[in-house]
Amino acid sequence: MLKDQSIYSTSTYSTDKEGKHLFDSPCGSHKVVYDPNSNWDFCLDVVQRPIDLSLVLPHYRARQQSTSTRINMFVGSESNAPVKLKVCRSFTRMKFYLEVHGSTSDVVVWLPSDFKGRIQHSGRASFSSGFVNRIIQNVRFNDHSDDGFEEDCVVVSTTGHITFKMWDVETCSAECAHKEVLRRVFGCGSKGAPETTGPSDWDFLLDG
């Protein structure tokens, strides 16, 4: 069974990028459908084209999808064109694995506000006010330990800049930057999130 092998490594780019799951439209919205016969439920690999995608997760578990299986998504860009990805989820129990290889691209990822799990990323990363307010307390960064498939997991590898933002599951839309900045300024967000730590920048004044 190929599902979820990629959680142990970020080397899947060269081995899994070919196949029927290549999706040749790097912009707009795409409904991700579970496929029990493939390692990836969604796979996109482009060259010299910007990516701006909303990945809409299923709102129910497929009949053939076991409770120990996540939705697996791969996005690759072999250029310095920007990569923007929104992970849209309305069913909290639909856990996902997202792997992004950006070469030299700047990568921006919006994660659902009910995200809970691990994020592995190369280099430095910035975090929007919404991410700090709603998500940061539920994330383990660059932790290679595996707690099984009952959590979300994101892997981002690029030499460009990485930014994480919040997709609000309550409004089904990207965070409202001004609203989240005010929440952060007036102390309505996460109490345990320092503004700077380690290799990351807690840039809560990011524009939306």
Image (cartoon, rainbow, N blue to C red):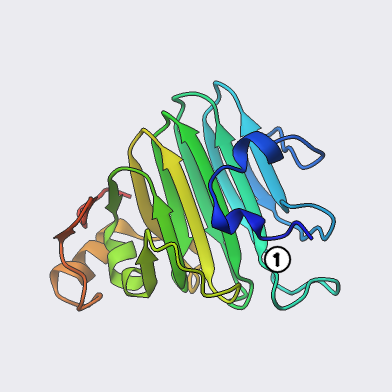
Q: Position of residue 195 (x, y in %)?
A: 15, 62
Q: Residue at the spot x=44%, y=42% of the render?
A: 157
Residue 91 shown left or right of residue 41 in the figure: left
Q: Position of residue 208 (x, y in %)?
A: 33, 50
Q: In this orientation, does residue 69 appear?
A: yes
Q: Nearer the viewer, residue 33 or 9?
A: 9
Q: Position of residue 16 (x, y in %)?
A: 70, 40
Q: Position of residue 26 (x, y in %)?
A: 62, 35
Q: Secondary structure at mark 1?
A: loop
> Relative to 151, is 106 above or below?
above
Badge 1 is on which residue? 58
Circle 1: residue type: Pro
> Relative to 82, is 84 above or below?
below
The quarter holding residue 34 reads: bottom right
> Relative to 84, is 35 above or below?
below
Quarter holding the N terminus is: bottom right
Q: Residue at the spot x=42%, y=31% of the render?
A: 105
Q: In this orientation, does residue 26 appear?
A: no
Q: Nearer the viewer, residue 104 or 48?
A: 104
Residues packed near mark 1 inside 10 Å, few (<14), some (14 to 19) or many (20 plus):
some
Residue 50 shown left or right of residue 160 in the figure: right
Q: Residue at the spot x=60%, y=70% of the render?
A: 95
Of all residues shown, which one is farthest toward the top? Answer: 48
Q: How many marks?
A: 1
Q: Residue at the spot x=33%, y=38% of the render?
A: 161
Q: Nearer the viewer, residue 153 or 111?
A: 153
